[in-house]
Amino acid sequence: MSDINTAWEKVKLARHPKRPTSQHLIKELFPDFIELHGDRAFGDDEAITCGLGTLNGTVFTIIAEEKGITTEEKIKHNFGMPHPEGYRKAIRLMKQAEKFHRPILCIIDTPGAYPGIGAEERGQAQAIAYNLKTMMGLKTPILVVVLSEGGSGGALAIGVGDHIFMFENSIYAILSPEGFASIIYKDSTKADVAANIMKLTAQDLKTYGVIDTIIEEHEGLHIDPDFGIQSLKKELVKVLKKLSALSEAKLLDHRYQKYRRMGVFIEQGEKSETKST
């Protein structure tokens, strides 16, 4: 199988209709999960599920993008495309987590933020930017999991973290391969070619330092979800133990340096580091 087919196959696996969504992951990791609602300004966005749950004796604040499985669920959850009120709900509960010294788990699964007029009128871009800024300074550990599809600002708005996990067959990119192909090639049918160029797989992003840990899947989450979920559970417990041992100052510095290193590369033939523009 060629590299292009490999990348495109991962895109298709990430979008597989039987691949479990965030609600399944939450159910398995947090059996005592309690959902919390609303941004205290406009309403409750069903595309983002928020709440509290206990993992290995530790109470987490969970922020999860939810696509839904059935047609009715997909419509209810807007196919996992959040509105501004979803991001405002998320950051409200993240601040609550900081106040009560709870670690945060963000689960990314979205093709992108909702691109409708209403979302723009209610401040989509500002909501995303505010989340990015605020998450950088939250004085509590933030763990991020890319479950299936991480698209554009819709994913980034809950994607700032101290440790980023990606499932083996998930994807994480600036936009969809179809959108990329439409812009670059003026032909969305070249999405398979675009997928390879975009370097959107977990393996590519681990190489570039964008993510930290790849969670192995056994034949795909749509076939054997328990294997991947149990592997994730072990990694979450292990990483949280390390992060919890850090002082607030060291935790924030670790987070800052992590993102400062992104976009830094060494030109071939040069000895000094060059910041990309």
Image (cartoon, rainbow, N blue to C red):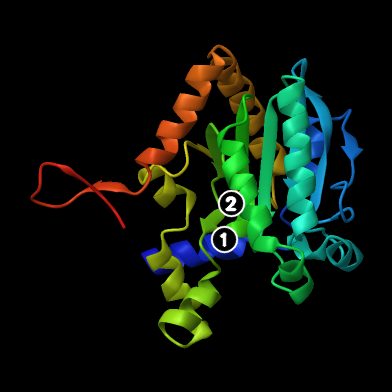
- Specify the label residue 262 is tagged with: none
Find numbered disc 1 in the image and state the secondary structure of the residue it sits on: helix
* Image marks 1 and 2: residues in contact by CB distance under 8 Å: yes
The image's mark for residue 152 is 1
- Most foreground residue, 258 or 96: 96
Circle 2: element type? helix
Above-or-below relation of 82 to 116: above
Measured as percent of width and height from the top left, residue 45 is found at 84, 55
Numbered circle sitting on residue 156: 2
Quadrant containing the C terminus is bottom left
Image coordinates for residue 229, horizontal then vertical, percent? 68, 36
The residue located at (75%, 28%) in the rendering is 97
x, y percent for residue 185? 42, 84
Q: Is residue 216 visible?
A: no
> From what the image shows, is residue 183 above or below residue 248?
below
Using the image as rendered, state which of residue 125 and residue 7 is in the foreground: 125
Residue drawn at the location 90% of the way across and 44% of the way down:
37
Going by the numbered disc 1, the residue's amino acid type is Ser
Q: Who's the residue at 48% across and 87% down the image? A: 187
User: Which quarter of the picture shows residue 54?
Assistant: top right
Q: CA distance from mark 1 to mark 2?
A: 6 Å
Query: Is residue 67 found left or right of 138 in the rendered image?
Result: right
Q: How many marks?
A: 2
Locate residue 73, reporting x and y percent: 88, 61
Q: Nearer the viewer, residue 112 or 221?
A: 112
